[in-house]
Amino acid sequence: MTVSPQVVHVESPTERRNPNTTDIDRMSTTDILATINTEDHSVPGAVRQVLPELVKAVDAATNSLREGHRVHYVGAGTSGRLAVLDAAELVPTYNVPSDWFVAHHAGGQEALRAAVENAEDDDEAGAAELRESVSAGDFVLGLTASGRTPYVIGALREANRLGATTALVSCNPEAPRFEGIDVRIVVDTGPEVIAGSTRMKAGTAQKLVLTAFSTATMVKLGRTYSNLMVSVRATNAKLRGRTIRILREATGLGDHECSEALTKADGDLKVALVQLLGDVEVERAVHALHAADGHVRAALAAVRAQAS
């Protein structure tokens, strides 16, 4: 049975009172903080339980980006702010194009700093925003602690209608199963320390899911070599220093050799890595990386196989 987001009134576990914190207002500062910390400890375990579903989301997003499409985040309130933060940080961290990850927040820019009345309750606003920006083949990840925020559900349903793959991250195992959602990632964080304050455990869970999702996607797309960020281009002194440090870590060579290689590679860290580790000329390193879709390990394997 399909469900309309406007008529759902199922209480989320995050809204219920937590039996472990009913006396929090009578505790010392030390005990308040210890109680919050104890509750927070349950979040990573809850996230671990949904890794099979998160795998599906990562693989779908990776395929979309490989095929020239985009990833969209959709959220409201805390969920939307976390989504905006994650999307913004990917550009400087992994040197990805600014339009690879697009964040849509109920109420727009104004709602990032202050609540915008009724913005999250407008499913048609969510649908309209995605209608203007989503294409078939894109991947859309919605985030809502309750699992039923109309703006998010409306956006996901419209995106699905347009041919995008959709996923929903929520913290409510009791939420209805809306149509138009391909992957459901339900992190059961239970009642909050302060009833209904989903910026706490639910927000932490969504932050963990987002950073794991986007980092795994970057790794799958070859934006790292080992656990090093190798998609950075040395466009200023600060970044040049960082890239030389990464080259030293990856190759074991000294500053002088790494600096020379980076200069020959025109500031491209990946090219310098393949050139040094594969012991090939820059042109060969560039060609190998192009053939390997930017994956350093695959490029190295190709040049070494050719040399043997």
Image (cartoon, rainbow, N blue to C red):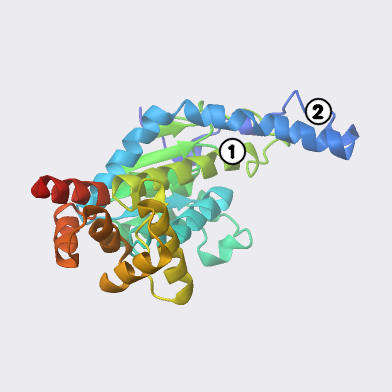
**Up-down relation of residue 129 to residue 64 (above or below):** below
On the image, the x and y values in percent for residue 271 come to 25, 62
**Type of amino acid at the residue the image marks with label 2:** Thr
On the image, the x and y values in percent for residue 63 come to 24, 45
At x 19%, y 57%, the residue is 289
Q: Which mark is residue 164?
A: none
**Which residue is under mark 2?**
22
Helix or strand or loop: what does disc 2 sit on?
A: loop
Find the distance from the CA under tag 1 to the CA under tag 2: 19 Å
In the picture, the quarter occupied by the C terminus is top left
Q: Quadrant of residue 268?
A: bottom left
Q: Earlier in the sequence, mark 1 or mark 2?
A: 2
At x 57%, y 61%, the residue is 111
Q: Nearer the viewer, residue 194 or 214?
A: 214
**Type of amino acid at the residue the image marks with label 1:** Ala
Q: Are marks 1 and 2 in contact (CB under 8 Å)?
A: no
**Which residue is under mark 1?**
202
On the image, the x and y values in percent for residue 145 come to 54, 39
Q: Residues within 10 Å of mark 1 (few under 14, many from 20)?
A: many
At x 52%, y 41%, the residue is 208
Observer able to see residue 136: no
On the image, the x and y values in percent for residue 233 come to 35, 68
Question: Relative to residue 308, is residue 113 drawn left or right?
Answer: right
Question: Relative to residue 53, is residue 121 drawn left or right?
Answer: right
**Up-down relation of residue 119 to residue 21 (above or below):** below
